[in-house]
Amino acid sequence: MVSIGRIAKATGRLIFQDDKFLKVAETTLTASKKSQGWKNIHKQIGDAFVKAENATKNESFWGSLKKLVTDIPKDMKNGWAAKGAWGKFKGIGGQLLRRLPLLFVAMEIPNIYSAFKDEGLVGGIKETLKSGTRLATSMAGFAVGQALIPIQLLGGLIGCFATDWVTSKILGKSHSEKKAEAEEALAQADISEQQAQQLQQYLAQQQMMANQNNMFASNPYAQGNFNVPQATMTPQQIMAMGQMLQGGYGLPNGNYMDQDFMAMTSGINKMNYMC
């Protein structure tokens, strides 16, 4: 029976694309697929990975990982040395694909750190296992795709994306994805609240304007609906009356100043007497 430690090492070799592990798995699966076809394909895949694990169980996992990193310059140089543009593309592309898991792991580190920070130890461990499972299944899909689809690189990419999609549906969204969705929902709620407040203010303004219009409509004086008294004297009659009041015209005794209505009311006649 395979121990947990051996399973963990095999998973690590799968994630980080250990050369020997993948070569044994792909070769075994290709041979069994050729002899058995698609019959019990799931069992063929399982047997291929078991054989790959048995072939690498006595080798150092960390040594293989270190070699994967330190050999980058040499492998890139060898890939560029291939003949023709297509050969160079395949050589460089193949080496980059081998290091692709390193990029995936680097991208998952902030997600795992966020899970530890937000959900504590248990949440962080769960997110680590989830991320590791997604990476392992994606890389397993890459190896299976390489073996089952006889198109270099394309088969691996198809298998990688297909298994990652299935695994994401089973395991659910990552912590970072859930956190981003929660923040977006909160932002949308704030926007909705602001829009509701603006709508309430607008409706209040409309109601106030309607009340003012109703008051204006019910007030006849506000509309100018009142009768202005019309003049009963002509302008000439008003002028003559003013002259009579100011000059005392036609009054007896000949003392017009004493009888001048305007002079009496203003006190000018008294001033004349004083002078």
Image (spheres, rainbow, N blue to C red):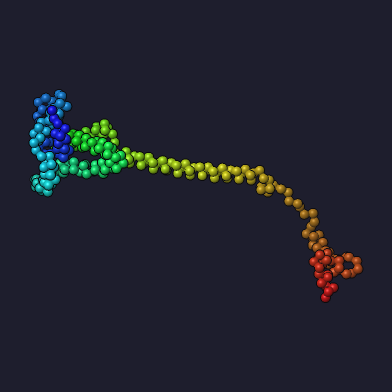
Instruction: Tell me where residue 129 sits by quadrant.
Output: top left
46, above or below 231, in the image: above
Q: Quadrant of residue 2?
A: top left
- Residue 111 placement (x, y as % from top left): 27, 42
Q: Residue at x 82, y 61 (%)?
A: 241
Q: Residue at x 34, y 39 (%)?
A: 181
Residue sitting nearer the eye, 54 or 206:
54
Judging depth in this view, the residue of 179 and 208 nearest the camera is 179
Outermost residue on the bottom side: it is 275
Relative to 233, is 11 above or below?
A: above
Can I make out residue 149 in this image? Answer: no
Q: Is residue 113 left or right of residue 48?
A: right
Give the quadrant of the N terminus: top left
Residue 82 locus on image (x, y percent) = 9, 45
At 15% from the left and 29% from the top, the residue drawn is 46
* 44 relative to 206 in the view: left or right: left
Query: Is residue 43 visible in the rendered structure shown here?
Result: yes
Q: In which quadrant will I find the C terminus?
A: bottom right
Q: Position of residue 187 (x, y in %)?
A: 39, 43
Of residues 123 and 239, which is closer to you in this image? 123
Q: Position of residue 10 (x, y in %)?
A: 14, 35
**Residue drawn at x 71%, y 48% as measured from the top left:** 226
Occupied quadrant, residue 79: top left
Q: Residue furthest top?
A: 39
